[in-house]
Image (tube, rainbow, N blue to C red):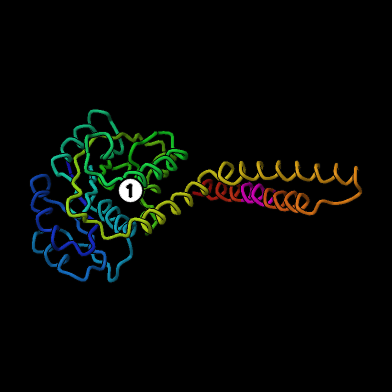
Amino acid sequence: MNVIIGIPAYNEEKNIGSIILKLKKITDTILVCNDGSSDLTKEISEEMGAIVINHDKNLGYGASIRSLFLKAKDLDSDIFITFDGDGQHDEKDIEKMIDIMKQKNADIVIGSRFLSQNKDIPKYRKAGIKAITSLTNISIKTKLSDSQSGFRAYNKKAVESTIPSEQGMSVSTEILIKADREGLKIIEIPINISYEGETSTHNPVSHGASVMVGTMKFISIEHPLIFYGIPGLVLLSIGLFFGVWTLQIFEQTRAITTNIALIGIGTTIIGVMLIVTSLILFSLVTVVRQKN
């Protein structure tokens, strides 16, 4: 079985060598996407025998995952594992992922931080991940506990059908939405994780906001009638209510209450715009999918 492990890496010279050494006990085919690092990530990875994919400049986590997916597909992987390069994941969980994938006939196995007793997860990170996961669960059938975990296993079908296009941190959500659309079986298993030293290079606020915006973007494209249509109907209903109220007041007093009238007009216009947007986007998405 051709097992390939892919590591997205940006300035990870402190961790990358020891990670590759540990992963070599599992497979000889280790990919490292050096995402424009300014340190010795590339040199150490090459010295350790990894296949290094180089980005001339820092393109983002999503771009690294895409490059790793494409390389894994070219190398005809049977199982492709994505493993973060910051030293937080435990390589011992990989064998468990592979075994579960075989036993459950799963297409994607996600290592969840919330199915095990990971008590050292920072509270702000835990809250952010759960909020984004709740948003992601709106758009997929399989309800997950950790949609943002970068520790995952993909079989051949999943690698070929979920290659991402997103360059930012919301790539994890994009892959799940694509997998759900393809009817792939997704399961989660508990994993161990360490946050010692706080290895993340991202500001937690900007990181969380970026993922949230990206997640909402994918949901709006995947389910435009729900994302735009339902708020549009709510606003249109509010607008009509205030519009009728304005007419009733005018009938009784022959005077227009400006504030009520403006609320009615404004919410009606916005509601109609959202409904029209949902219909147009739904039609476009449907046409594009039919052509593909």
Left or right: residue 74 versus residue 165 is left
Left or right: residue 274 versus residue 9 is right
The residue that appears at 33% across and 48% down in the rendered structure is 124
Magenta-colored stretch includes residue 174: no
Residue 161 makes an appearance in the image = no
The single residue placed furthest to the front in the displayed view is 253
The residue that appears at 20% across and 58% down in the rendered structure is 32
Q: Position of residue 218 (x, y in %)?
A: 47, 49
Q: Is residue 154 above or below residue 16?
A: above
* Closest to the observer, 122 or 14: 122
* Closest to the observer, 40 or 54: 40
Q: Is residue 209 above or below residue 121?
A: below
Determine whether the residue tagged by mark 1 lies in a helix, strand or loop: helix
Magenta-colored stretch includes residue 276: yes
Q: Quadrant of residue 241?
A: top right
Q: Position of residue 170 (x, y in %)?
A: 38, 52
Magenta stretch in the rendered image: 272-280
The residue that appears at 25% across and 42% down in the rendered structure is 153
Left or right: residue 27 versus residue 244 is left
The residue that appears at 21% across and 54% down in the rendered structure is 198
Q: Quadrant of the N terminus?
A: top left
Q: Position of residue 34 (x, y in %)?
A: 22, 63
Q: Quadrant of residue 189?
A: top left
Q: Is residue 107 above or below residue 85?
A: above
- The residue identified by callout 1 is 124
Q: Quadrant of residue 93?
A: top left
Residue 160 makes an appearance in the image = yes
Q: Amino acid at mark 1?
A: Tyr
